[in-house]
Amino acid sequence: MEIKDKLFNKYDYDVEISDETMKDYINLRPSVLPHTFGRVGKRKKRIEKNIVERLVNKLMRGGTGEKVGGKLIRTHGKLQGKKTRVIKIVEEAFDIIHEKTKQNPIQYLIKAIENSAPREDVTRVEYGGVRYQVAVDVSPKRRVDMALRNISLAAIISSFDKKATLAEALANEIILAATGDVNSYAIKKKDETERMARSAR
């Protein structure tokens, strides 16, 4: 009988992906520690990375450098390159999710990605020197990237100059997005993106 690795030796990777279009772009290869040590290779190979590691990589950003919700969110690169530290933050966040919901946090992460991934976006095209915004379908690969980016950005914003830790903010955002709560930042960004696409049709 084959014994499969569990994330952090706690959480099983035996979870369900209900969105068929995303199955090829969400990697659930069993791994105790979500860290490939750069062995995956080129950027186009990032879909081969464990989905939890991709979340970790998104959290290592240095803030947005632009105003979000009326505030300039900039973490000054406090987490850039500190992957081990971010992995511990994600583990703590998953522990909080498990404690609150009594369910597998990996399943909650997958559900959060499915709920917060926009299906339509806008792009600029130029005809005769005039630029227009037109609606386009979003590829499954980009949908996963956008969802992970918005979830991680929501955690950074929620913990920026606040009493909540990054782990608590991340756990809260994943739970809100997984349940489809309108208070989720990632859900709001998805709705905003799709609303702009509808108006550009």
Image: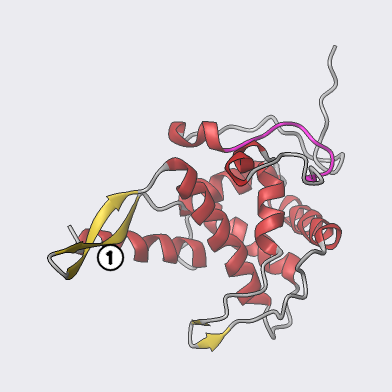
Is residue 22 in sight in this rendering?
A: yes
Residue extending furthest toward the front? 128
If the image is split into quadrants, where does the N terminus sit? top right
Main SS type for the magenta part? Answer: loop
User: Helix, strand, or loop for circle 1?
Assistant: helix
Q: Residue at x 76, y 32 (%)?
A: 30
Q: Which residue is mark 1?
A: 196
Instruction: From the viewer's side, name the closer residue of 30 and 165.
Output: 30
Q: Residue at x 73, y 75 (%)?
A: 77
Give the magenta range. Answer: 26-35
Return the x and y of residue 80 as percentages of the image width and height: 75, 68
Instruction: From the viewer's side, name the closer residue of 10 and 56.
Output: 56
Would you say 19 lies left or right of 12 here?
left
Q: Residue at x 45, y 61 (%)?
A: 187
Question: Is 27 one of the magenta-colored residues?
Answer: yes
Would you say 191 lies left or right of 145 here?
left
